[in-house]
Amino acid sequence: METSLLLIQLINGLQLGVLLFLLSAGLTLTFGIMDFVNLAHGSLYMLGAFICASLTQLTGSFALATILALPLTALCGVIIELVVVRQLYSRNHLDHVLATFGLILCLDTLAELIWGPAGIAVLLPGILNGGVEILPGVVVPAFRLLIIAVGLMAAAGLYIVVNHTKLGMLIRAGASNRTMVGALGVDIKTLFTGVFAMGAALAGLAGLLVAPIAEASIGMGNEIIITTFVVIIIGGIGSMKGAFIAALLIGLIDTLGRSYLDDFFNLFMSHEAAETAAPAVSAMLIYLMMAVILAIRPQGLFPAASR
Amino acid sequence: MSDHTPATRSPAFWINAALLALLALVPPILFITGQPFWLDVFTRLVILAIAATALNLILGFGGLVSFGHAAYLGLGAYAVGIPTYHALYGGMDAIASFNGFLHLGLAIAISALFALLTGAISLRTRGVNFIMITMAFGQMVFYAIVALENYGGDDGLTIDVRSEFPLISLDNPLTLYAVGYLSLLLVLFIVYKITRSRFGLTLQGARSNEERMRSLGVDCYRYQLVAFVISGALCGYAGFLLGNFTTFISPEMMDWTRSGELMFMVILGGAAFLLGPVIGAAAFILLEQLLREVTIHWHLPFGILLILSVLFFKGGLAGIVDRQRLKGNRQ
């Protein structure tokens, strides 16, 4: 096992973990505060990627596209909240799941109508395209380091907003007792729309960060949303701290599992058996881990305080 | 369905009977009059109605929102595909066979086992956790099959030879439809018997008020787990039929969006009504078929209709009939 390769895989895992955190943070906010389950969260991730891809082509600048794409994705979130989501707060979780499932079908098809069925690649400016030598002889893509940095900054920003601002105080109060906050004269409806938009912007941020690596494509959100669910199940639903730790854990385990599981299986299996088993097991690894954690702690690692 | 004594058959009973009679008669007539395409649509309809009825046992009667039931369809279908593949191309002598009984047994056994293992863990949680966990376990099967490149992985697997049974041949589309239709009746009968049994009543009691059931000394977890396993096994049976019907199987058929569609069939028709899922599956598949003919972007109007049905259409199609009945009773 080469150390430099391991280091690169660690960075890839960290990068995946950071993206997963951006997605799970949005879900955690909407679930924790509005008690709303949003399956269409992955579609906002997709919208972020497509909007960024279009704007990059239009303006010729990835940086400018990024700055414009964030508020635009948040705006999409506001529209979705006003038209559909708002009607659902008083309903049960089953209705949330079904309606947002319908929303996914709509948003995926709309994206296909606007951007076409093929994916759109996003070109990076030269400065981000290169590699950075983090250790002698170990070069990692600069953009992946940027993703990690941006993700960690977003996490820190979120922490400060939620814990040290008036808005954050309202958000936390809303999470612990909605009715009371409303009775104290806070405009709950606007607060909810704002929180939903914030979640949308975080999902959009993840989407536009991943677009240069993977390209924007229809249905990209439907794959990652399940991994995001695994993250928040393991972390404990509604817990931001749990989401952060579980996201990094899942990112690392998934990435390392895919690279090293066959080596590990080779230790006690024939080469052929390992070749067959390793891809299947590494594809299931995070789900198996989820199963084990739930068997021991049904509420996840860091269950949010009960309401 | 509601309580019937022979003397007072409700309108719902007659509607249900008419629906089952239509399903028995219309597709064969369409086939004989030269519309084989519609027989295919109806075959898919009855098979998915079986899966939806199986899901209704835990979703409607048990109140457990499982979002991973497409996995059982896939497991059942691959229980046909994998033995057939080995019978044709060698390897895995223990299961290599065209024998339909072996396929059927494998489909039901593997589905039941998977339901037992995942149910044992997911049933320790409730609400949103349960929805997401069943979803994640379903997707685990999806990814496992994608990774099995021997069996086509992402590209899927063609079933070159259908399951073989004595006396009947599933290659005949009418026979296949008849098998599907009779299976649907059988599964409806099983679910009906379960919901009327002491076991089924306990399950429904746990749905209405779990705490109260527990304080009565009932171990709800066990009842729910058994129901979960029965539901999984029945759904695996539907998968066995689906594999024999499509003869091409791929991980796509167990994607989580498929599970969402199954849930919609149950809710659209009316959860906790015996024939609700059948009505839902019929509405779902016929609507899908009609929209497909209008536009290739049929997902958009379809999605809008789904959202509207959630917002304005509580209780599903069967609920309308039932509300009429309740009104009638009150008068």
Image (tube, coloured by chain):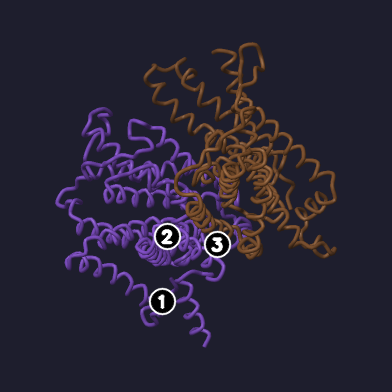
Marks 1 & 3, CB-CB < 8 Å contact: no
Residue, x 53% and y 63% (percent of image)? B307
Q: Chain of mark 2?
A: B
Between B118 and A168, the one lying in front of the other is A168
Q: Chain of mark 3?
A: B
Say what secondary structure mark 1 lies in.
Answer: helix
Marks 1/3: CA–CA distance: 23 Å
In the image: residue A159, left or right of residue B309: right
User: Which residue position holds label 3?
Assistant: B205
Q: Position of residue A67 (x, y in %)?
A: 69, 43
In the image: residue B65, left or right of residue B291: right
User: Which residue position holds label 1?
Assistant: B12
Instruction: Say which amino acid is labelled 2.
Output: Trp
Q: Residue furthest bottom?
A: B331
- Can you tell which chain is drawn brown? A
Between A273 and A113, the one lying in front of the other is A113
Say what secondary structure mark 2 lies in.
Answer: loop
Residue, x 41% and y 56% (percent of image)? B54
Marks 2 & 3, CB-CB < 8 Å contact: no
Q: Nearer the viewer, mark 1 or mark 3?
A: 1
Q: Is residue B22 above or below residue A147?
A: below
Q: Position of residue A146 (x, y in %)?
A: 67, 30
